[in-house]
Image (cartoon, grey):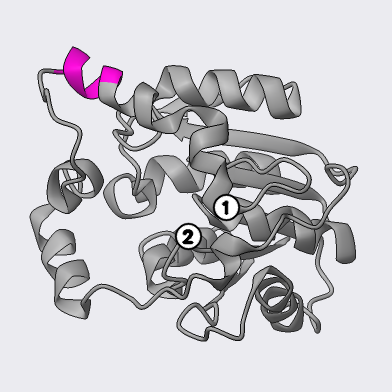
Amino acid sequence: MSTFALIPGAGGEAWYWSRVVPLLGAAGHRVVAVDLPAADPAAGLVEYADTVCAAVADMTEPLVVVGQSMGAYTAPMVAARVPTRALVLVNPMVPAPGESAGEWWAATGQAAARAAHLERIGLGRTNFDEIEDFFHDVPAAVRAEALALGEPDQADTPFEQPWPLRAWPDVPTAVIVGSDDRLFPLGFQRRVVRDRLGLDVEVMPGGHLMALSRPRELARLLLAHGT
């Protein structure tokens, strides 16, 4: 039995993990999906990590820390503070020491990689389209539920702060990426993850929001690292 701490990306809503939580629970694990104080301009990366650490403070099972997208900035900070069995990143923004999440985009060449990918798949545009880029593979009913919740507030603070760790924590780390992610394309992720972590990625079908579009496949991979 493990405890899975599930960290969402920008917007910080635990609801993002709502389709994965019951699957991990049904496999006999404790699951904590964390709401981050994303709307609070006084909350930055340290406060995000504090929130997650507080949420798992009374857990006694081995901890698996999972960070999605921007949650990859918080997840290793938690793993550096709390004994952690495994660190799993999902379609992540893999940070470098001293690099802010706002700087990450240009430093990694994300815009050019995304534009080239969209061109390859026949979507010759550079503008961001929430439905086509985020929800293109999410079931219609789940998409409607997500859109009905409204766009979460996200303060700029954690995007402006340099990532505070000097090195990656000494914790077994895995990176799961979607073969159809239109925000962080597969080839781009392979390069960034190799350059920054020295790891190969694990590829599964799905776009950027795989916890919503492919919860069973994602849960299966998470369980492989948590048991």
On the rendered image, what quadrant is the N terminus found in? bottom right
Q: Which secondary structure lies at badge 2?
A: loop
- Residue 204, position as x, y percentages in the image: 41, 29
Q: Which secondary structure lies at badge 1?
A: helix
In the visual, does 59 lie left or right of 143?
A: right
Which residue: 56% across, 75% down?
A: 34
**Residue 202's disc number:** none
- Residue 83 visible? The answer is no
Q: Which residue is mark 1?
A: 101
Q: What distance separates the C-alpha of mark 1 from that of mark 2?
A: 11 Å
Up-down relation of residue 198 to residue 225 (above or below) = above
Residue 208 falls in image quadrant? top left
Q: Which residues are magenta?
A: 116-121
- Residue 98, position as x, y percentages in the image: 76, 48
- Residue 23, position as x, y percentages in the image: 45, 59
**Residue 9's disc number:** 2
Residue density around tag 2, few if under 14, some if 14–19, many if 20 or more, within 10 Å: many
